[in-house]
Image (spheres, rainbow, N blue to C red):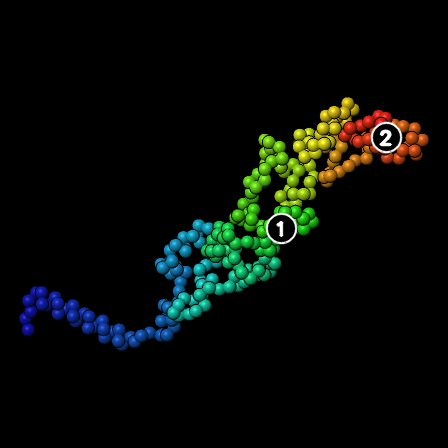
Amino acid sequence: MVFSGYRQKEYSCLLVYCCLAVILLAAGPGPPEAAAEQNVLQKNDCAKCHPYKVQILTEAGGKHATEIGCLDCHPQHPPKGENTISPCTLCHVGQPHFEITDCLHCHVDPHRPLASLRDPVKPARDECLSCHEEPGLQMSASPSRHADLFCTYCHESHRMIPACLDCHGPHLSGQSEADCLRCHQAHQPLHIVPVGYLPESFCRVCHKRQAQDLAETRTYHGTVNCSYCHKGLHPSVPSCLDCHDRPHAGEAYRKYSPCLDCHGDAHRLVVPREK
């Protein structure tokens, strides 16, 4: 039989296809192990359907991106399996923080566990103190309005430290954030221990009567800085003998034991005391 050039080419292709079909049929479907291996997810498969998740994991996943892979947390995929999300406790064990059951209450997105830390409208306290023990101890030792608040009332995001002046007005016009911290600590604001040099104006704005007395006295007490006498935990009241030793004869101390029986008030000394 004679074919034209075109028909001959078509016939040749048909023969090739038939031969391939015969070979494939003879080979059979192959061993079950090979077929099963083809159905197992590989780590590169996830990005094909979930490019956004892989992107945010790469950008902000932390150890979730560098130390584990998608398949460590998502071992199966529907419809081949229902074990699609492993519990956090599969990896996170051995610390009090990991005993808190609702991880997603704070870690909103496991693909960026720290960058998405808590939704601002959700209150959190025990969750925070399970890692940050020291602030909890400070607030328990020195109760204050701060100790009654949820941690997230001030810390709107993880490691975010608000300024005192975001909520509080200064005692004295012109005071800065650094000035607040000379006396107050955020987690125990009523535990006042002045640090370093403290201008007299910082004390006198709250202690107005003492300030007025010091302004009117003509004694040396009117010239010294408040923190020279009042050291340590506020309020502190020093003994007169811390500075003055015993300037009078012994009989005077036996008759008038407290110095201020005669001298009135340390901020407005009177000599002698008026009868």
| Residue at image coords 86%, 30% | 262
| Residue at image coords 79%, 35% | 238
Q: Is residue 43 visible?
A: yes
Which of the two residues, 113 or 46, is positioned nearer the viewer here?
Answer: 113
Q: Quadrant of residue 183?
A: top right
Left or right of residue 171: residue 253:
right
Percent across and percent down for residue 132 are 61, 51
Where is mark 2, residue-wise? 262
Secondary element at tag 1 = helix
Position of residue 225 relative to residue 17, above or below, is above
Label 1 is placed on what type of residue?
Asp
| Residue at image coords 20%, 72% | 19
Left or right of residue 252: residue 142:
left
Left or right of residue 5: residue 241:
right
Count of numbered marks: 2
Q: How crowded is mark 2: few (under 14 residues within 10 Å), some or many (20 or more)?
A: some
Secondary element at tag 2 = helix
Q: Which residue lies furthest to the right in this view?
A: 251
Q: Quadrant of the C terminus?
A: top right
Where is mark 1, residue-wise? 148
Q: Can residue 66 be seen in this view?
A: no
**Which callout, 1 or 2, points to the residue nearer the camera?**
2
Label 2 is placed on what type of residue?
Cys
Which of the two residues, 32 or 196, is positioned nearer the viewer here?
Answer: 196
Disc 1 from disc 2: Cα separation = 45 Å
